[in-house]
Image (cartoon, grey):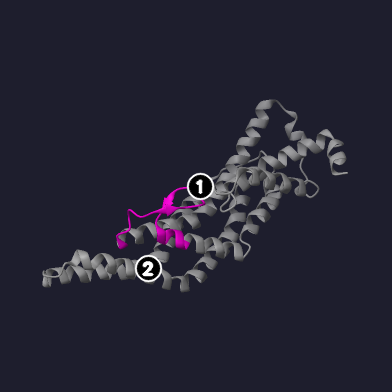
Amino acid sequence: MLEASIINWTMDQILTMVIILTRVAPLLFFMPIIGSRSVPAQVKILLTLMTSLVLMPVLKVNPQILSGPPLSFVLLVLTEVVFGAILAIFARFVFASMEIAGMMVGIQMGMGMAAVMDPQAGTQVAPIGMLWNIAAILIFLSIDGHHMFFSTMVESFNWLPPGQLHLTEATFNGIINGAGHMFVLAIKIMAPAGAVLFFAHVSMGIIAKTVPQIQILIVGMPLNISLGLIFAGLSLAYFLPLMLTNFEMLARLLPQLGMGMGG
């Protein structure tokens, strides 16, 4: 029955499906977690098709948008890709702060050369950054944070009709502010471990000057690693409320950013 209903689709229904796909696909392919490299492309494609089929009877899309020349379809796809990329980049700032904080703490611990594979970006990051990154992903999924992308995606058809992207000064300011907040959040995350490691370095420097007989390099390496791991673990106690606050802020700002691109 399903196959017969698909075969009997009208041209307007096919065009509507294509228009919805042009917005759903970039958002799902660029968004955090689902859009990571560790998720197979086949899964992303099936999820995109399933989401588009579910949204077809819900959304009101004018299929006449695709009645123009082929160049108009190319412009439509480009605007939708830009729209999805802007929203996804804004959301990825929060997760990128974990990698920055982990890299800074890892260098202070003397583990700058040690790295593990990040399943989201497909790159190597510091082990401490991976710990915080995995914790953030679990918190994000536990509060249904991925639902904010789907709700923003559905509501965006009301704010921003397909192919009518407006990039204003407020949009660029929002992205710049998001990038600035990324570094502030990274400092907040690494503050406990970073502060302890800083005072440990100062203390070892004083000891090396006052008691030169102590092999400070031999003593300092395991001490820094131990202090870094201990306080990185202890920082998870305040990591949860910090991330909840930032994810709630992201849920408020993401629709506002989408509305701003609607003119």
- Residue at image point 85% right, 36% down: 7
- Residue at image point 41% right, 59% down: 127
Query: Over which residues does the magenta segment extend?
Result: 109-132
Give the numbered dot on residue 172.
1
Other residues around mark 2 within 10 Å, as few (<14) / some (14–19) / many (≥20): some
Kindly state the secondary structure of the residue where label 1 is placed: helix
User: Which amino acid does the dot numbered 2 rest on?
Assistant: Leu
Side (left or right) of 88 relative to 180: right
Other residues around mark 1 within 10 Å, as few (<14) / some (14–19) / many (≥20): few
User: Which amino acid does the dot numbered 1 rest on?
Assistant: Phe
Answer yes or no: is residue 1 visible.
yes
Side (left or right) of 38 relative to 71: left
- Residue at image point 33% right, 53% down: 113
1 or 2: mark nearer the eye: 2
Identify whether 250 is placed above or below 85: below
Rendering coords of residue 97 (x, y %): 45, 57
The residue lying toward the viewer, choosing from 122 and 250, is 122
Give the numbered dot on residue 229.
2
Give the total of numbered labels.
2
Rendering coords of residue 114 (x, y %): 35, 55
The residue lying toward the viewer, choosing from 235 and 70, is 235
Rendering coords of residue 159 (x, y %): 68, 49
Side (left or right) of 69 relative to 4: left
Answer yes or no: is residue 195 visible.
no
Q: Are marks 1 and 2 in contact (CB under 8 Å)?
A: no
